[in-house]
Structures are given as C-alpha cells and as structure tokens.
Image (cartoon, rainbow, N blue to C red):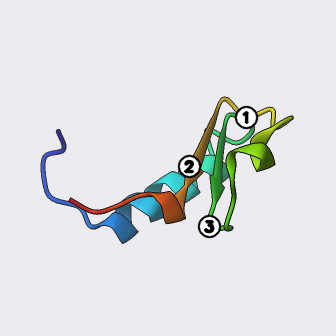
Amino acid sequence: RIEKGASYDEIKAAIKEASNGELKGILSYTEDEIVSTDLIGDNHSSIFDAKAGISL
C-alpha cells in the first residue's frame, strides 16, 4: 500500500521516470498498442504497458 492515493496518470508518470532513470535497461515503459509477440527478444526484465492498466 502507498501512504496516499495516486491516480493512474501519476503512477504511469512515476514508472516512466524510473524507466528512463535508475531502472533504465531493466524496466521498459510503453504506451504503444502491443501484443505479446511484440515483446519477443526484448531484453528488459519488466515491461509496463500503460494502455493495459486500469485505475481501481
């Protein structure tokens, strides 16, 4: 749990920032329309698909 609420846009921004900063080369961030086969051969440990998430 986080200490305060966060919107999905805030979460996406934080993940995008991390993927370009301290997690560059480990975490990938995409807003592209992708399917699982698009990820074949990708060397990142984790890929965040911003369009696949939902806000609860």
Q: Tell me the element at label 2.
A: strand
- Residue situated in front as seen by the camera: 20 or 38: 38
* Marks 3/1: CA–CA distance: 16 Å
Left or right of residue 49, residue 39 in this image: right
Q: Which residue in the structure is indicated by mark 3?
A: 31
Front position in the image: 29 or 4: 29
Q: Could you say which quadrant of the image residue 11 lies in?
A: bottom left
Q: Give the position of the N terminus as an image quadrant.
A: top left
13 relative position to 24: left or right: left
Cα separation between marks 2 and 3: 9 Å
- Residue 53 drawn at (x, y percent): 42, 58
On the image, the x and y values in percent for residue 41 come to 86, 35
Q: Position of residue 35 (x, y in %)?
A: 69, 53
Q: In the rendering, at what x and y percent does residue 48 appear?
A: 56, 49
Name the residue located 67 percent from the left edge and 67 percent from the top edge.
Answer: 33
Task: Say the numbered circle drawn on residue 44.
Answer: 1
Q: Which residue is mark 2?
A: 48
Q: Is residue 31 above or below residue 38?
A: below
Q: Quick one: label 3 or label 1, which is nearer the N terminus?
A: 3
